[in-house]
Image: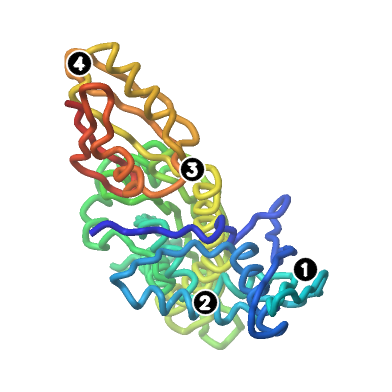
Amino acid sequence: MKKTILLLSGLAIIIFAAGTAYSTQKVVETEGTSFSSKKDAIRQAQRAAVEQGVGVFIHSETETANYVLQKDKILARSKGYITSYTVLEEEKKDKKYTVKIKATVSLDKIKDDLIAMKILLESMERPKLMVLVEEDYIDMKKPGMRIAETEINSLLAARGFELVDKSQVEKVQEQNKARQALAGNISAASSLGLSFGAQYVIIGKAVVQDVGEAFAGTGLKSIQTSLQLKVIQSQSGLLLGSVVKNGVAAHISPLTGATISLKNSVQKAADEYLIDAITNSFQDYLNNGAPLKLHITGVKTFKHYKQITMEIQSIESVVSNKKEGWNKAGGLLAIDLRYKGTSEELAEKLDGRSLGKNSLEVVDFAPDRVDCSFH
């Protein structure tokens, strides 16, 4: 079933300010109109401010009433995201009220809104994440479970992120590519993510240490942890950044103390970095185009190669394209695209597209690629 996607505005749920600080608000000027009252016109202007400042990117599916309900819920709370506003202009003409406002929109509030996050994730075709974290225990017995990895998965799942199944991750943890990724090899991490259909890979290491009694004579063990995480975008192979967070706990049981300390450091990493890094990546892709692989088979002549590449360049929303390669014998043309939209939208534009006596036919697509045949 094909989706009709309505872009209400560019996504800006999380905006990075200069350095390491995050911008927590955005000032915008918007206009609202109403035939009922000035108050309603202001309300419409406030909704527009939230759409522009927060940048909700919403699917509109006529067959799914729940989406309409979600959209209404997020916009109905628009006033709650506006910390202040000033009426700049107002006019009443032919029973129509028009109001222009300057509003300050809080980005902190929207960041923790689960409905908004769900809409955001759906707009990005529910990107999948893969989490791979190694744990090293010093002066302690190593538990048989991966506490940090489990906790990260749990926190991200609670936010609505789709994750590679834990049992699948466990099967590859001892493989060479996984060991390379954990050792900091970005290329290996990217390749591993793509093999599981994950658009983002979170790799890291947690070091847990028993540093002795927390308080003399109490028997409480002081457990300290240091957690380092890196976020890699699989399609582009880019390292989005890294973070180091520490945790500490005092408990009579070293294992329980380790669990508490690891959970504390994971919580800090998720709240202060991970969610922001990934949603900021969404913003970049919606503003500048998401990376997509376009593979076209049946391209047997150089003339057709040139014809197809020129046609791809002319498609609206194709920001850039880079020819990865073409092989006349195999007839495969591979192109790396930056596309403002989803793979399904691009597939709709390509399917049945005529190029002289020939045409393109979409044979498959996924969030990170579109496969076509030329005949």
C-alpha gap between disc 1 and disc 2: 20 Å
C-alpha gap between disc 4 and disc 3: 29 Å
Residue at the location (31% across, 49% down)? Answer: 344
Return the residue at label 2: 74
**Which of marks 3 and 1 precedes in the sequence?**
1
Work out whether 325 lies above or below 346. above
Residue 368: give its label. none
**Which of marks 2 and 3 precedes in the sequence?**
2
- Disc 4, disc 1: CB below 8 Å? no
- Disc 3, disc 2: CB below 8 Å? no
**Which of marks 2 and 1 precedes in the sequence?**
2
As drawn, the residue found furthest toward the bottom would be 218
Amino acid beneath label 3: Gly
- Disc 4, disc 3: CB below 8 Å? no
Amino acid beneath label 2: Ile
- Which one is in front in this view, the residue at disc 1 or the one at disc 2? 1
- Which one is in front in this view, the residue at disc 1 or the one at disc 3? 1
C-alpha gap between disc 3 and disc 2: 25 Å
**Which of marks 1 and 4 precedes in the sequence?**
1
Residue 300: give its label. 4
Return the residue at label 1: 102
Return the residue at label 3: 289
Work out whether 337 lies above or below 357. below
Which type of secondary structure does the marked residue at label 1 adopt? strand
